[in-house]
Amino acid sequence: MNNSIELFYNSNNMKRWTVVFRTLTNINRLKIIGLLSDGRKMNVGDIAESLKISFKATSNHLAMLKNLDVLEAEGAAGHVFYSLNPQMPNDFRKILNHILK
C-alpha cells in the first residue's frame, strides 16, 4: 500500500474519521454550523428558534460540537454565545470547507 492509504487505514485515524462523520450526519448539527459559518455568534435560544427544535436538543448539539472543538463558547450578558472555532481540528475544517461552499 502507498503511504496515504496506509495513513487512512491506521486504526486511530479510522476511529477519528468515524467520530467526524457521525457528528456531521445529524442535519441539525450541520444547520448549526451553517448558521454560524458567516462569523456570527448566537446563543442557545436563538439557535433553537432558528432551527425550530427544543432548547434541550440544541444544547446537546452545541455541547457535542464544542467538545470536539468545532465551536467555541463565550459568556456575555448572562448568555453563552457560540461561534465557529477558528482553530477547529483540520479534519473538521477540510470537510466543512466542502460542505459550506
Image (cartoon, helix red, strand yellow):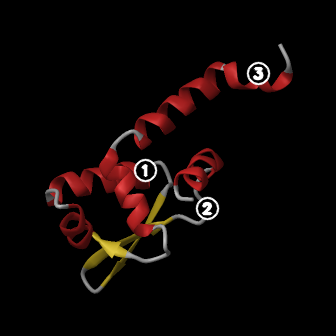
Residue on which disc 2 sits: 87
Label 2 near label 1: C-beta < 8 Å?
A: no
Residue 56: % across, % down: 16, 55
The answer to whether residue 88 is left or right of residue 79 is right
In the structure shown, which secondary structural element does the residue marked by tag 3 occupy?
A: helix
Q: Residue furthest top?
A: 1
Marks 3 and 2: which is nearer the front? 3
Marks 3 and 1: which is nearer the front? 3
Q: Quadrant of the N terminus?
A: top right
Which label belongs to residue 67? 1
In terms of sequence position, does the residue under pointer 3 or pointer 2 come before the other? 3
- Image vertical order of residue 40 relative to residue 22, above or below: below
Q: Residue at x 42, y 59 (%)?
A: 33
**Callout 2: 10 Å neighbours few (<14), some, many (20+)?**
few
The answer to whether residue 34 is left or right of residue 2 is left
Residue 13: % across, % down: 63, 28
Q: Quadrant of residue 49?
A: bottom left
Which label belongs to residue 1? none
Separation of marks 1 and 2 at Cα, in angstroms: 13 Å
Q: In this view of the protein, which residue sits in the foreground, 87 or 8?
A: 8
Q: Residue at x 26, y 50 (%)?
A: 60
**Callout 1: 10 Å neighbours few (<14), some, many (20+)?**
few
In terms of sequence position, does the residue under pointer 3 or pointer 1 come before the other? 3
Residue on which disc 3 sits: 5
In the structure shown, which secondary structural element does the residue marked by tag 1 occupy?
A: helix
Q: Residue at x 20, y 70 (%)?
A: 45
